[in-house]
Amino acid sequence: MAYRPTEKTKARRAAQHEHLLRTALAIVAKEGFQGLTISAVAQEANVATGTLYKYFDSKAALCTEVFKLATEKEVNKVQQAAFPAPTSQPLPCRQRLINAITTFAQRAIQARKLAYALIAEPVDPMVDTQRLVYRQAYADIYSELIAEGIKAKEFPMQSPAVSSAALVGVIAETLIAPLGRDQQPPLDMEGEQKLINDIKQFCLRAVTGLPT
Amino acid sequence: MAYRPTEKTKARRAAQHEHLLRTALAIVAKEGFQGLTISAVAQEANVATGTLYKYFDSKAALCTEVFKLATEKEVNKVQQAAFPAPTSQPLPCRQRLINAITTFAQRAIQARKLAYALIAEPVDPMVDTQRLVYRQAYADIYSELIAEGIKAKEFPMQSPAVSSAALVGVIAETLIAPLGRDQQPPLDMEGEQKLINDIKQFCLRAVTGLPT
DNA sequence: TATAAGTGTGAATCATGATTCACTTTATAG
DNA sequence: CTATAAAGTGAATCATGATTCACACTTATA
């Protein structure tokens, strides 16, 4: 009689799903969540608006998936910086903290609009919930690193939960918020290095309790 | 011939303006900017929607005024904590920093919904611009205090602009963001003190570069 | 009291953008 | 080729909430 989904059609469906998702991500990276409308995605992806709804239950669902996609990659990079594959010569926590912050900062500056969208851009509450998860993912990395540093006596006693959230706040406010809001001219290379360095020093003092 | 505004009518107009503004503020304090709609304000204030437009050019203008009203009071309190009226025995910068942070934290916990609305709630871009001003007002206080502390050799060399923004970020992320998003049960008195203390320690280490 | 200007009204209108759905097209199995 | 299920279409519909405006009511001068 009839029709039955096959490997080929399943693959096509998955490919389309990915295509739409990446199109949406590109829009967010260029214009922020403000520019992420169903019709914009449809237009950019050369499909009709209705098609989007064959792949995503709602705009909220789409936003969530976009958020996840963007998040995973970024968080992974920072995770690797904080917890590198073990080598013969293990790095001290202090150095790994520096690496994590620098990695985050540099990637954020590279894709400032995206970083702003993920961290700070005002978005509707549905997406904001997802953002909480995202920030927590970062905080968890720092939290683990700080706990390790305390145990190793590298860092003084402190609440890893509070300190890690604080670090996320520092970075969000110093680095990302000013970048994204308006069209402030981008910093030159030199100013950028100085900014990252100032942030790094602040975070180090805060976590280590030592003058830098 | 004709009509001319008089003292009495001007006063009435000013009173009405204030009444509407305070009504709007009350809504924000209770429900956040999410609940701030023209019709909600009208209803609460017992006027028609059209009346709002006799007093405010647009919703954006109303939001801006609400923001300012709420802001000024809060910023003033912190300002006073950071720069108290000079006494015979001037306080060290370190202590004034502690006072400023504590003041902010306690007021935020008192009126958590309002604090969340002002600092972190996702709002439309028009209001977000105003928020930038608000955060900057806080940052300016810290910035001046830090600069003074550096000059007095209480604090090590650092960028006051970066450190002050970082402090705002710390407070926003650790204190306010977790409070406002969902309906997390409020902390008990003890947990609250511990949280404030952890934040205080973090900030002190960051600014002074000394173990606490 | 007559006239001009200001204030208040709230239903109607707009604007934006998500969501639906009747219909067309495409892919698969017999 | 034919029947069936899925994918794609896009104009029409909904939902939300800001904004307008023709009209009624008040207040201040002459």
Image (spheres, coloured by chain):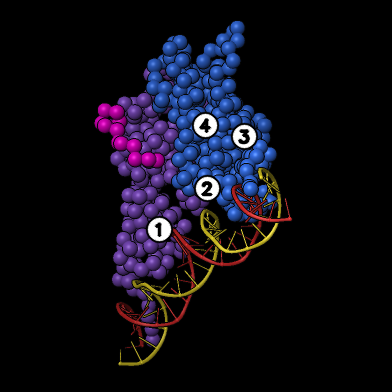
Chain colours: A blue, B purple, C yellow, D red
In the picture provided, is B30 more to the left or to the right than A31? left
Residue projecting furthest to the top? A88
- Please tell me whether mark 1 or mark 3 is closer to you in this view: 1
Q: CA distance from mark 1 to mark 2?
A: 28 Å
Mark 3 neighbour class, 10 Å CA radius: few under 14, some 14 to 19, many 20 or more? some
- Please tell me whether mark 1 or mark 4 is closer to you in this view: 1
Q: Residue under label 4, please give it.
A: A171
Three-letter code for the amino acid on which mark 1 is drawn: Thr
Provide the chain ID for the residue under circle 3.
Answer: A
Image spot of residue B65 (x, y percent): 41, 55
* Residue drawn at 49 percent across, 51 percent down: B124
Q: CA distance from mark 3 to mark 4?
A: 12 Å
Three-letter code for the amino acid on which mark 2 is drawn: Asp
Question: Do callouts 3 and 4 mark residues in contact (Cβ within 8 Å)?
Answer: no
Q: Quadrant of residue B50?
A: bottom left
Q: CA distance from mark 1 to mark 3?
A: 36 Å
* Residue drawn at 41 percent across, 51 percent down: B34
Q: CA distance from mark 2 to mark 4?
A: 34 Å
Quarter containing the C terminus of chain B = top left
Question: Do callouts 2 and 4 mark residues in contact (Cβ within 8 Å)?
Answer: no
Whether discs 3 and 4 lie on one chain: the answer is yes
Q: State which region is magenta.
A: B181-193
On the question of residue B46 being in view, the answer is: yes
Question: Do callouts 2 and 3 mark residues in contact (Cβ within 8 Å)?
Answer: no
